[in-house]
Amino acid sequence: MLPEQQNPQEWQDIIERGARCALRDDNARWDWADLALDVAGAPGDDHAGNGSGEILDKLIADVAADAHVGISELPTNHTLRNYREAADSLPPGEHRAGCGVSAARELRRHYKDRATRYAVVAELRAASPKDRVTVDDVRTRAGVKTTRPRPKVKEYSKLAVELHAAYVCMHEAAELAYANEVDDSDSYFAHKMLAKVELEIERVRDNVPQPDSVRDIDAEFAGLLGGDAK
């Protein structure tokens, strides 16, 4: 339902919920995911337009105003769409424990029904020394070969800095596109590249081991994708 079609108080409650996500000090990705799903509805397999883009744009703008933060400090429209997909893939519950939003989206790609996803999550968590489920775990379980090696711990600092710089650059490009300051082809390119950087940040968060000696490097991700990296 579009914002103008909703009860004003209901929409204000939604905005306040988003503001709480925006002002949290910890990782709020799953909270953003549930909010995006509640506001825009479940994604359709046919990708038909249902006004969700307009709804999420309005959500971002109103949350920024209510929380007194810049739009660049909030998840992008594309990010919220990805989060919504994750929330629809794994609704709130025990099966989410140890599973990030990117891993939930990967589960959706390979396993169409929720019961199977729940079973796969339980299986992968049981096999993980850290009781976690990563994108690579899901891909391996689904029989997808990956040739990209995981970064080593000593490479984490450099990678975090590079990804942070790439994210800021592409976010600024996407904002220019959103403001209609570039043509449609550049707008499409900016959002596609931003999506790739976002996916890489998610992969690093999910897969790189983070002992105490490198936890401070997570500060490089502070504020990106709707919450600090943990």
Image: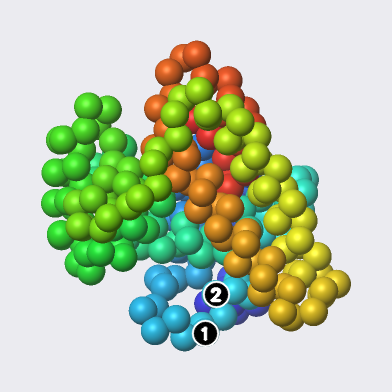
Q: Is residue 2 left or right of residue 48?
A: right
Q: Do tag 1 and tag 2 residues touch (Cβ < 8 Å)?
A: yes
The kind of residue tagged 1 is Gly
- The image's colouring method is rainbow
Q: Measure how far apart labels 1 and 2 are at the Cα level.
A: 7 Å
Residue 79 location (% of width, % of height): 55, 58
The kind of residue tagged 2 is Ser
Q: Residue furthest right?
A: 181
Place residue 45 in its image quadrant: bottom left
Residue shown at the point (22%, 27%) measured from the top left: 129
Place residue 61 in its image quadrant: bottom right
Residue 221 location (% of width, % of height): 61, 36
Residue under pointer 1: 49
Q: Dot 1, how many residues are within 10 Å of its Cα: few (below 14), some (14-19), or many (20+)?
A: few
Residue shown at the point (51%, 83%) measured from the top left: 50
Can residue 224 be seen here? The reply is: yes
Q: Which residue lies furthest to the top in this view?
A: 213
Q: Is residue 27 above or below residue 116?
A: above
Q: Is residue 184 left or right of residue 26?
A: right
Q: Is residue 230 left or right of residue 55?
A: left
Describe the element under mark 2 as helix, strand or loop. Answer: helix
Q: Dot 2, how many residues are within 10 Å of its Cα: few (below 14), some (14-19), or many (20+)?
A: many
Q: In this view, does 147 lie above or below 12?
A: above
Using the image as rendered, state which of residue 16 and residue 75 is in the foreground. Answer: 75
Residue shown at the point (52%, 19%) measured from the top left: 214
Residue shown at the point (50%, 53%) measured from the top left: 199
Describe the element under mark 1 as helix, strand or loop. Answer: loop
Can residue 228 be seen here? The reply is: no
Using the image as rendered, state which of residue 73 and residue 200 is in the foreground. Answer: 200
Q: In this view, does 113 lie to the left or right of 133?
A: left
Residue under pointer 2: 52
Residue 133 location (% of width, % of height): 28, 41
